[in-house]
Amino acid sequence: MLGAMTVTTDWVKDHRSRAVALRRVVAAINEKGGVGKTSITANLAGQVAATGRRTLAIDLNRQGNLSRDFGIRRTPQDDQGAALRSAIVEGTALQVAPDVRPNLDVAVGGSKLEDLTLTITMLLTRGDFHEAYLKLAAAIAPIAHEYQLIVIDCPPESPVLDNLALAAARWVMIPTKSDDGSLDGMELVAQRFQQMRQINPTMQLLGAVLFATGTNAKAIHGKVRKSVADLFGGEDKSPLFQQHIRHAERVAVDCREMGMLVHELKEYAEQQPNYWTAKRSGLNPRPMSAALDGLATDYLNLAKELLMVIAQSEQRGAQA
Ligand SMILES: Nc1ncnc2c1ncn2[C@@H]1O[C@H](COP(=O)(O)OP(=O)(O)OP(=O)(O)O)[C@@H](O)[C@H]1O
Ligand SMILES: [Mg+2]
């Protein structure tokens, strides 16, 4: 494990040192909006933290949806991205919202990130391409050793912020729906992935995750698998995660409204009195979707698969 370190410009420019410090950083990225980046970041981070592994979720979005998913929106922990912005732009030590769940901290996003794209763009026009894009990496690096997993929730349609995330990430995960628009968004990520490898040569594709899909839609899953393989070449053997996230809109809406992760809503539902018993007793219970258990299982299995793929890849790296 790496100790805390002072991040100098030279250190940040050395990609081997960066790769060691940031070895557990995953970017959840797709240029297309609404493909599950935030839902997957929140639920994966929550599931991994629930196994006892220290986890950090980073929200690069000015909407701050991740705070909503964790139920901390408009609470004292919600600084609307002020600390994250200051760490990226001014180089101050990154202050996270601690213990949002046991073992889970959050670098909160929100409206204070509004001008981040412009600020980074100005730095790019002024000078060093590497230094500008490595600003998020430099912000995360001093605290990265505290976490076993760090997941970055990337914004849609924001090439500059996506590049910040790709310069900081060891691993890339691409949530996608099966429609052509989402696959086009994935194609843009593939191009960006190649460009940013100039700065971050050790970055690797973990795979795409099919989001909000029918559980038995084998032909559709096959089409997405082929698109991912075509886009990312033969280099990566398992371009599509085996586990997909099923369509369960009602559960998703309930979770966001209640500020609960899917597995938390499942546990909450299990503790409630039976719906019909409660109704007969004159209470007004909230009916839970039948898809709740299945969706919680999807996220649990996705978290296991993610940790397994990272561990296997790290083992291969250690043997090489
Ligand atoms: N399993 C699911 N099935 C169907 N809809 C879902 C599911 N999970 C989440 N949703 C809904 O899908 C929408 C998009 O999800 P999410 O916000 O995670 O995507 P995103 O890629 O982060 O979007 P954006 O690009 O706007 O940041 C949300 O309205 C959410 O409630
Ligand atoms: Mg989002």
Image (cartoon, helix red, strand yellow):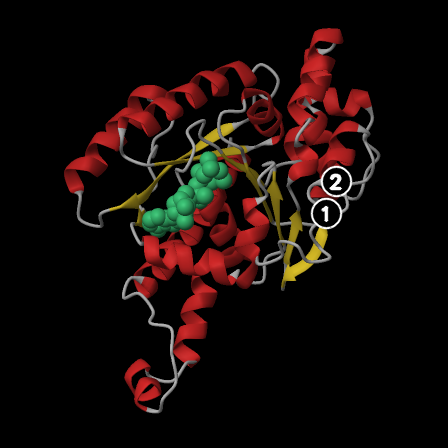
- Total marks placed: 2
Residue 40 x %, y % = 45, 46
Residue 240 x %, y % = 33, 36
Amino acid at circle 1: Asp
| 98 w.r.t. 308: above or below | below
Mark 1 crowdedness (10 Å alpha carbons): few <14, some 14-19, many ≥20: some
User: 229 left or right of 261?
Assistant: left
Amino acid at circle 2: Ala
Mark 2 crowdedness (10 Å alpha carbons): few <14, some 14-19, many ≥20: some
| 269 w.r.t. 26: above or below | below
Image marks 1 and 2: residues in contact by CB distance under 8 Å: yes
Cβ at disc 1 under 8 Å from ligand 2: no
**Depth order, front residue of 238/167:** 167
Q: Residue at x 71, y 53 (%)?
A: 97
Kindly state the secondary structure of the residue where label 2 is placed. Answer: helix
Quarter of the image for residue 5 reads: top right
Residue 191 x %, y % = 44, 16
Q: Residue at x 70, y 8 (%)?
A: 125
Residue 241 x %, y % = 34, 41
Q: Which mark is residue 246?
A: none
Residue 309 visible, this orientation: no
User: 192 left or right of 95?
Assistant: left
Residue under numbered circle 2: 82
Kindly state the secondary structure of the residue where label 1 is placed. Answer: loop
Q: Which mark is residue 79?
A: 1
| 208 w.r.t. 47: above or below | above
Cβ at disc 2 under 8 Å from ligand 2: no
Alpha-carbon distance for marks 1 and 2? 6 Å
Residue 19 visible, this orientation: yes
